[in-house]
Amino acid sequence: MDLKLDFVCDCVKGILLGGNSKSSINGVSTDSRHMKAGQLFFALQGENFDGHSFLNEVFSKGAAAAVVSKSSDQLLYLEDQALIMVSDTLRALQDLARAYRSQFAIPVIAVTGSVGKTTTKDILDCCLKQRFKTHKTQGNYNNDIGVPLTIMELASEHQAAVLELAMRAPGEIARLADIARPNCALITNVAAVHLETMGSIEEIAKAKCEVLAALDSSGFAVLNGDNEELLKAASFYTCKKYSFGYSPLCDFHIKKVKIERQGISIEMRLLERDELLWFPLPAQRLAGNVAAAVAVAVLLGVELKAIKAGLAQYLPSGHRLQIIPLDAGGMIINDSYNANPLSMAAALETGRELRGDGQWVAVLGDMFELGDYEVAGHQEVGRTAAENGVEMLLAIGKRAEFIAQGAEAAGMSREQIHHFATKEQGVEFLMHNIDQRDTVLFKASRGMGLESMVDDLLKAFNK
């Protein structure tokens, strides 16, 4: 990156206070801790932080300039530094990212959906990088700050970008898509997530489909063809649409999935061509994610041989379906990144398919942001655990008491169900009641941090 300050000022509608308008920046940052020499610092403000408090620090680290939004006594001591005054620093970051994105005539794929968008993004990246030098969203950089920062990391060598777009309320996807300007939109599904802020599945579907408005006449969308609410919401948009899923009507039709301990084989019809695909995680629920990613790769012209090579290279990230073999033949399934009733059900189905000769144990914690569906959603998960043959259920957290209730109502005995208020109590129980022959699933909303239970259990096993 090499942007002149006068270009930045023009993009963000800012006024340069001090500094040389012809000097350059080589990157952007919103975090003083990771500031590098030559970067442009955006002094963002939030409920618990104010970037203006770190201006002296960022300039001591060699910042080329800073975007600020208010006058303060601190700014008086920086009169020799390049400050760009704007009305809103977050809006300025987004405006600069939008302008910077326009400098790249490359495929930009926006991935969104209620469940599985990060996994699908990563699978798609594996497929695309067999042909393109790709850039993708890292971690949870999928919001109002993360998407602009990801775009600002694009470099001249990049030939494609895969951007994840998240939302909690109507209008957020539209705003992010306006910044990202995607050529392709991939919507994995819509499900009962963020009902606390969205109200209904119908409203979630409408909000996810906001990304379709950003597509021009040459763009296209890839949609879950098994999701009626999604298809209904998408029908109001005129962009070119393709579908993936189990329905024979889908353009990319999943015909059969075979689960093996090492992975899954997927028989698919890719438009008019039948193919057999291999994916190295033994989870049937991921067949849809694979189909979605393969659909986009095919439509972008990646050869099938290259796509298959990309699928074979996939590795899960960030506590998403990490399968950890145990010495005596059992396994830990760490899927603790996040949870909702749909993803809980999918994880339980995966555990049922993978279980060995030992006990089948599910450690399930609170799910957040379910709104009015909170009680029923947790009870549904308990029923699903019982239906999938769980032999020992640990419900962790206040809300998880309803998981326990649902499991008992579905036929699990009280001796099989154990509710604990804290993770520490749960780990203590596990250490005395399971061994390395067992299959143990961990899943809850991210805020529960169940991965700490996984770490504690592995330490105990490795002693």
Image: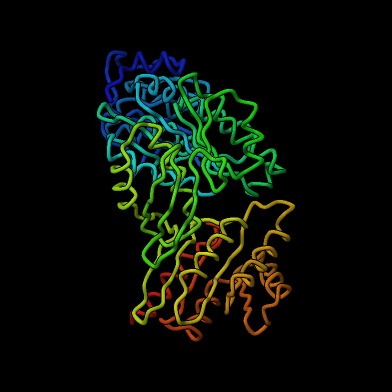
Query: Is residue 401 positioned above or below 175 on the image?
Result: below
Residue at image x 36%, y 14%? 7
Query: Is residue 192 positioned above or below 399 on the image?
Result: above
Taking the image as drawn, is residue 444 in sight? yes
Q: Relative to residue 235, is residue 73 drawn left or right?
A: left
Q: Report the colour scheme.
A: rainbow
Q: Residue 369 placed where, x, y %?
A: 64, 51
Query: Is residue 52 positioned above or below 390 on the image?
Result: above
Q: Relative to residue 128, is residue 234 drawn left or right?
A: right
Q: Residue 58 placed where, x, y %?
A: 34, 35
Q: Residue 327 placed where, x, y %?
A: 34, 79
In front here: 461 or 332?
Answer: 332
The C terminus: image quadrant: bottom left
Residue 2, image quadrant: top left
Q: Relative to residue 196, is residue 186 drawn left or right?
A: left
Taking the image as drawn, is residue 52 in sight? no
The N terminus: image quadrant: top left
Total marks drawn?
A: 0
Residue at image x 47%, y 33%? 44
Q: Residue 220 placed where, x, y %?
A: 48, 28
